[in-house]
Amino acid sequence: MLLTGTYARTIEEKQRVTIPKPLRLALELGAGSALYVAPGTDLSLAIYPEKAFSQLAERLALASPTASEVRDFTRMFYARASRVEPDRQARVRIPQDLVDLAGLKKNVVLAGVGDHMELWDADRWEKYLEEKLARYDDIAEAAFGRPPQTAPTDRLAAPGARATNPK
């Protein structure tokens, strides 16, 4: 399962958002399917399918429970996470406290982010993109790890040989 794409949506008065068809198909949503809505980063909400949410929980369980950031994160994350089930129209109801947390208004954006989706207020999403797109290449390098910087003579050295820099 790989969730991708960006979809403009509206959030109804009853705080429901419709999951678009490409994401529904990737999620294989059906009767009894569950999703988890939780606080995301950058004032977004994260929406996880059950399997991805369980995998996240397993990763968090490996972190040290004595580290203050781990305790703080798990408390804030799990205390506000909510299990939701899509209705027949593939709509999910977003709990009011999470709507308020993310500052969601009528126009929202649902973005596929690999193993989960993010729900953003549309204006906040546009501002986020404006800020980040100019730095896309740098962000990509950081995400994948920059290759080690070597001196030009190091690149010419035979494998296993020590390079020398003439003075």
Image: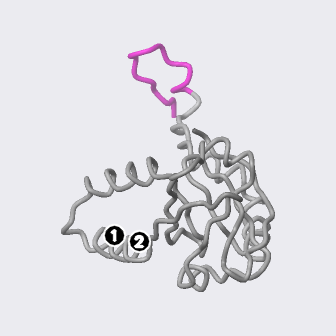
Find numbered disc 2 in the image and state the secondary structure of the residue it sits on. Answer: helix
Q: Amino acid at mark 1?
A: Thr
Quarter of image, res 26 = top right
> Who is closer to the viewer here, 135 or 114?
114
Left/right of residue 62 with respect to residue 103 in the rendered view: left
Task: Identify the residue at the far top of this view.
Answer: 158
For the point 61% across and 40% down, the residue is 2
Left/right of residue 134 with respect to residue 103 in the rendered view: right
**Where does residue 147 sit, x and y in percent of width and height?**
54, 37
Q: Amino acid at mark 2?
A: Phe
**Where does residue 131 sit, x and y in percent of width and height?**
74, 68
Circle 1 packing at 10 Å, graded few (<14), some (14-19), many (20+), is some
Q: Which residue is mark 1?
A: 74
Find numbered disc 1 in the image and state the secondary structure of the residue it sits on. Answer: helix
Q: Which residue is mark 2?
A: 77
For the point 54% across and 34% down, the residue is 151
> Who is closer to the viewer here, 140 or 35?
35
What's the magenta region?
153-167
For the point 74% across and 77% down, the residue is 12
Rendered-image quadrant of the N terminus:
top right
**Residue 136 in the image: above or below residue 153:** below
Task: Identify the residue at the far left of this view.
Answer: 66
